[in-house]
Amino acid sequence: MKKFAALFSVLLLVILQDVVAKQLVIKTFYPESYAEVLANNKGKAFILLFWSVDCAPCLKKLKQLSEEKIAVKQKFIFVSTDGDDMLVDVAAVIKQLNLEQQVHWVFKSERIPEIINSVDSRWYGEVPRYYYFDNNHQRIRLQELKLKQ
């Protein structure tokens, strides 16, 4: 009986780990979140990608990234500009494209103009928008995100 209980416990643990691993985490992006993203990635290069569920070029790029399985050597941080009142739609797109394991944020709906300004005072909210940050966090706005074809 003890062997059965131990086997059951191990099996349950494996199942729970699989469920937890596939959970989607989407954090709310406030004006101060931009600084948090930089602090959490100190000394690391990454691409900050802003997108929206109703932006066809955004969805095309996300699909490309999903199909490319996102190069391990390049970190991406995805930020939906839709607002947290559209969280269900944002989550559906992420899940449909199998991007659950990536870092995701969604704008706080009531603070979108402040958030946009906190990221880039020359930005008016158009998407898709990409920023590359090198290891020293020198920011370069990318006009287009080119992937290997």
Image (tube, helix red, strand yellow):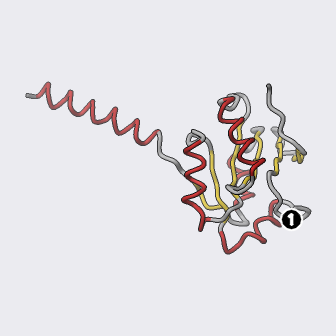
Q: Position of residue 66 (x, y in %)?
A: 65, 35
User: In this rendering, would 49 be left or right of 97?
Assistant: right
The residue to which callout 1 is attached is 124
In this rendered view, identify the residue nearer to me: 25 or 136: 25
User: In this rendering, would 16 be left or right of 77?
Assistant: left
Helix, strand or loop at label 1? It is: loop
Give the residue type at disc 1: Tyr
In this rendered view, identify the residue nearer to me: 35 or 29: 29
Q: Position of residue 7 (x, y in %)?
A: 21, 27
Residue lying farthest to the left in this orientation: 1
**Residue under the point 73% across and 66% down:** 31
In this rendered view, identify the residue nearer to me: 61 or 120: 61
Residue lying farthest to the bottom in this orientation: 110
**How many numbered tags mark residues here?**
1
Q: Position of residue 135 (x, y in %)?
A: 81, 38
Asked if 115 appears above or below 136 in the picture, the reply is: below
Q: Quadrant of the C terminus?
A: top right
Q: Quadrant of residue 105?
A: bottom right
User: In this rendering, would 86 be left or right of 147?
Assistant: left
Q: Quadrant of the N terminus?
A: top left
**Residue under the point 78% across and 38% down:** 45
**Residue under the point 47% across and 45% down:** 23
Asked if 129 appears above or below 31 in the picture, the reply is: above
**Mark 1 packing: few (<14 Cα in 10 Å), some, or many (20+)?**
few
Asked if 33 appears above or below 41 in the picture, the reply is: below
Q: Quadrant of residue 47?
A: top right
Q: Position of residue 141 (x, y in %)?
A: 89, 48
